[in-house]
Image: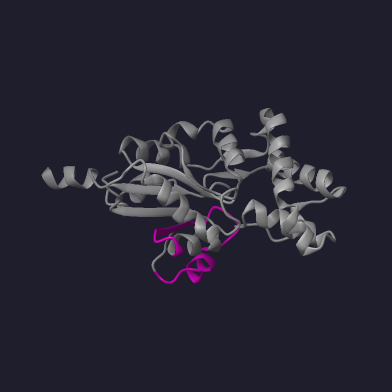
């Protein structure tokens, strides 16, 4: 009994990627508001009509990288794209705020996610986000899909609005989490569906847990790791996930 109680007292931090990990795009209007916010930014800042992020590889990238690379693809010089990045981010957020009621269109929570988040929060695990999304848009998605209530308050994480490189975001989230748990953590974990999530977790000193709920296969996720990553098919088995953390599920 004492051993079991000690397990539950472990100080554990878990951060989650958003798109492809907690939620997925669905239907013809997939990730509608986020995509429209990108398109609005390209139109307002550069006058680009019908510019789409599908023109570049964007899975696992931060919003700032996607903004810059897409603008370059459509003929904007790299220097100008980088210089106007703050303006593009401002226009994205402005559009998202004005159309926030559309946030859930073309999105749904992946199977098992709500149950897992509930189990983690009930076990006093500190839960945050690490995502390439701009922070405000990330929390809009959590709100719109009804799962923000499971995240540790005050909400924290590492976001595309913090740094253009995803590799730094795990460290940023961990630093912010220290304010909630000054004693530090026995275990830090980051969960994501792309090779960049795996690399970011390991760069940031966290255990990488990959999930095959995005576009990447188990083999692709394994290859991106230095060897310590754990790959799951999805997040439907809360007990297995909790046991990986050393917490009885």
Please state if 116 lies on the left or on the right of 20 as rendered.
left
Q: Is residue 33 magenta?
A: no
Q: In which quarter of the image is residue 71?
A: bottom right
**Residue situated in front as seen by the camera: 13 or 176:** 176
How far across and how far down the image is residue 52, in percent?
Answer: 78, 51
Q: Residue at horizontal 45%, vertical 60%?
A: 201
In this picture, which residue range is highlighted in magenta? 203-227
Please state if 187 lies on the left or on the right of 115 as rendered.
left
**Residue situated in front as seen by the camera: 219 or 76:** 76
Q: Residue at horizontal 32%, vertical 43%?
A: 181
**Residue situated in front as seen by the camera: 227 or 174:** 174
Q: Does the magenta stretch include residue 214?
A: yes
Q: Relative to 223, is 171 above or below?
A: above
Which of the image's four quarters has the N terminus? top left
Q: Relative to 218, is 127 above or below?
A: above
Q: Residue at horizontal 74%, vertical 56%?
A: 83
Please state if 95 lies on the left or on the right of 209 as rendered.
right
Can residue 27 be seen from the camera position used here?
A: no
How far across and how far down the image is residue 80, in percent?
Answer: 79, 59
How far across and how far down the image is residue 36, in percent?
Answer: 75, 41
Q: Quadrant of residue 207?
A: bottom left
**Residue situated in front as seen by the camera: 106 or 153:** 153
Please state if 73 lies on the left or on the right of 114 as rendered.
right
Q: Residue at horizontal 53%, vertical 31%?
A: 146
Q: In which quarter of the image is residue 79?
A: bottom right
């Amino acid at each position: 009994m004492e051993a079991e109680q000690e397990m539950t007292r472990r100080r554990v931090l878990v951060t989650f990627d958003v798109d492809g990990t907690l939620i997925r795009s669905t239907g013809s209007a997939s990730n509608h508001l986020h995509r429209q916010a990108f398109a609005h930014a390209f139109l307002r800042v550069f006058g680009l009509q019908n510019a789409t992020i599908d023109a570049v590889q964007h899975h696992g990238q931060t919003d700032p990288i996607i903004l810059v690379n897409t603008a370059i693809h459509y003929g904007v010089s790299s220097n100008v794209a980088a210089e106007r990045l703050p303006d593009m981010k401002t226009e994205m957020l402005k559009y998202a705020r004005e159309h926030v009621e559309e946030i859930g269109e073309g999105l749904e929570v992946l199977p098992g996610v709500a149950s897992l988040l509930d189990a983690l929060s009930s076990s006093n695990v500190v839960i945050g986000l690490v995502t390439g999304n701009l922070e405000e848009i990330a929390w809009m998605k959590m709100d719109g899909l009804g799962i923000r209530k499971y995240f540790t308050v005050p909400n924290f994480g590492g976001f595309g609005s913090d740094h253009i490189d995803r590799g730094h975001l795990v460290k940023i989230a961990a630093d912010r989490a220290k304010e909630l748990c000054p004693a530090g953590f026995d275990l830090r974990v980051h969960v994501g569906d792309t090779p960049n999530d795996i690399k970011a977790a390991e760069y940031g000193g966290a255990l990488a847990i990959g999930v095959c709920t995005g576009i990447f296969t188990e083999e692709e996720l394994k290859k991106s790791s230095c060897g310590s990553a754990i790959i799951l098919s999805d997040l439907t088995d809360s007990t297995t996930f909790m046991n990986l953390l050393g917490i009885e599920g």
